[in-house]
Image (tube, helix red, strand yellow):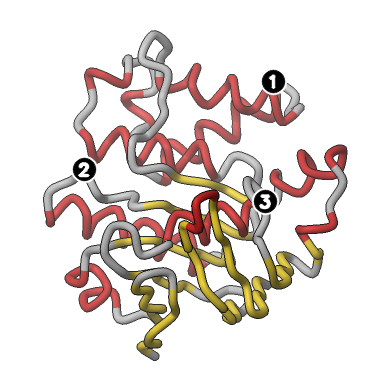
Amino acid sequence: MIQMFQVSKVYPKHVEALLDITLHVQKGEFVFLCGPSGAGKTTLLRLMLRDDIPTSGQILVNGRNVIRLRENKLPPFRRTLGVIFQDFKLLMDRTVYDNLHLVARVLGIPDTISRRKIGRLLTEVGLLQKAHQIPYMLSGGEQQRVAIARALLSDPTILLADEPTGNLDPDLALDIMRLLADVNVRGTTVVVATHNPRLVSEMGRRALILKHGRLVEEIP
């Protein structure tokens, strides 16, 4: 599902973000990328998304060599991936429903289908009754649930989450992780970057530990 072979990423002025990373995420797995700030977690996710390219090495996602993808092939490739950000990236002048509907239009989903799909996703994340509220009226945990529903609109085979609970208190963070675990149970491969060891311990999933851009440990 996701394979990296001897991947390194060096930025200008010899800033080494990743060094010689080799990893394999199986289809249907739930995997944590762990490590302190600056360990390389976000860079690793950006390479999986093909939001950046490595300095060296090879990356396969869904069987495709992402480094060799042409620009016109990037949009359909990225539609196979869902992405969740720490800061939610919701439009605060639109309702919850409108935030999702805008993405559905970009994806080319017909309105008759998107209405049903948005309703189903908001039901799954427990927010159907708040569909017509503005996001700033919601709690941080609720805003993150909206972001998760938005990421699932394209029926992604892989869900990438970059510190999705970084702004939430411990109990809310665990609730979000359980929601992502439910998504995983339905067949979606989930990769979560976090610096929170409690979440990793509570969830009991495989964890890849990064330190100074290197993969230093794997917790089965």
The answer to which of 91 and 146 lies nearer the viewer is 91
| Circle 1: residue type | Asp
Front: mark 3 or 1: 3
The local secondary structure at tag 3 comes to loop
The answer to which of 216 and 207 lies nearer the viewer is 216
Query: Which residue lies under the disc numbered 1?
Result: 111
| Circle 2: residue type | Asn
Classify 140 as above or below 79.
Answer: above
The answer to which of 87 and 119 lies nearer the viewer is 87
Identify the residue shown where x is 26% and y is 64%.
Answer: 36
Q: Quadrant of residue 214?
A: bottom left
The local secondary structure at tag 2 comes to loop
Q: Which mark is residue 167?
A: 2
* First-in-chain label (2 vs 3): 3
Classed neighbour count for the residue bearing mark 1: other residues with Cα under 10 Å, few (<14), some (14–19), many (≥20): few
Q: Which mark is residue 10?
A: none
Percent of width and height locating residue 73: 85, 44
Query: Which residue lies under the disc numbered 3?
Result: 50
